[in-house]
Image (tube, rainbow, N blue to C red):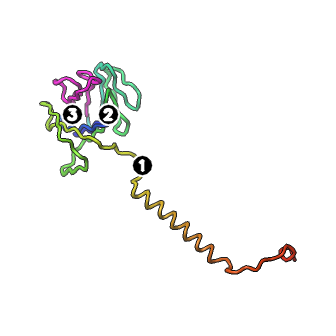
Amino acid sequence: MRLLIKTIDDKILEFETKKHSFIIGRSAKSDIVISHEGISRTHCQIDVVDGEVYVTDLDSINGVFIEDKKLEPGIKTHYPLYLALSFGPVQSMEIELQIPRTHTSSRIRANATISSPNLSKPIESVEKVKAPTSKKDPAKLRIIIMSVLLTLGLLIIYYMESRPSHVEPQTPEEIYED
């Protein structure tokens, strides 16, 4: 399982674990450690049961939110992966249940890594990476704009060529003749 966590200071933390139940917190005893004063020592627990994800707030000070709705502490809550999950300084968390075997990433990895004895792989800090958005790719947007401008230009040329090249001026009487 792979977790991508975006913090409020625009850092991306990446975690990989083989556990189906793990605790996220500030304490070294947590399975996934996020060293930030906005995270409780044991902030929340994530459980994966039959491909479904559940989140439990472990009486954290700052709470756990699914789509800005605060979870009741101590109650295991179903978490649909398409909704936003946030807590403390964690702005969003993306959970990938299956890790691809051949994983190539276009992210720029920082030199600093944070290790945790409870994780199968070290935690890596990634900086200056924008979260995926629904906005169109700027290159595609430029192509669309250029296509529209080209079409308008061709319509103007067609209009200019289709009208008579020389029109004799008419008097008002000539215009209104039957």
| Front one among 13 and 20 | 13
**What residue lies at 17% left-to-right and 34% top-to-bottom?**
114
x, y (%) of residue 98? Answer: 23, 44
The residue at which mark 1 appears reads as: 135
In this rendering, the label closer to the viewer, 2 or 1? 2
Q: Residue 42: within the magenta?
A: yes
Does 137 appear above or below 128?
A: below
Looking at the rendering, which quadrant does residue 16 occupy? Answer: top left
Query: Is disc 3 surrounded by few (<14), some (14 to 19) or many (20+) residues within 10 Å?
Result: some
Q: Which mark is residue 9?
A: 2
| Front one among 169 and 100 | 169
**Label 2 SS:** loop
Chain-order first, disc 3 or disc 2? 2
Looking at the rendering, which quadrant does residue 44 occupy? Answer: top left
Q: Is residue 165 left or right of residue 1?
A: right
x, y (%) of residue 68? Answer: 41, 29
Q: Residue 27: within the magenta?
A: yes
Please provide the residue range marked out in magenta: 20-48
Question: Do residues under tags 2 and 1 come within 8 Å of each other at their CB atoms?
Answer: no
| Front one among 60 and 106 | 106
State the separation of the CA atoms marked 2 and 1: 21 Å
Does 7 appear above or below 153?
A: above
Question: Do residues under tags 3 and 2 come within 8 Å of each other at their CB atoms?
Answer: no
**Label 3 SS:** loop
State the separation of the CA atoms marked 3 and 2: 28 Å
The residue at which mark 3 appears reads as: 20
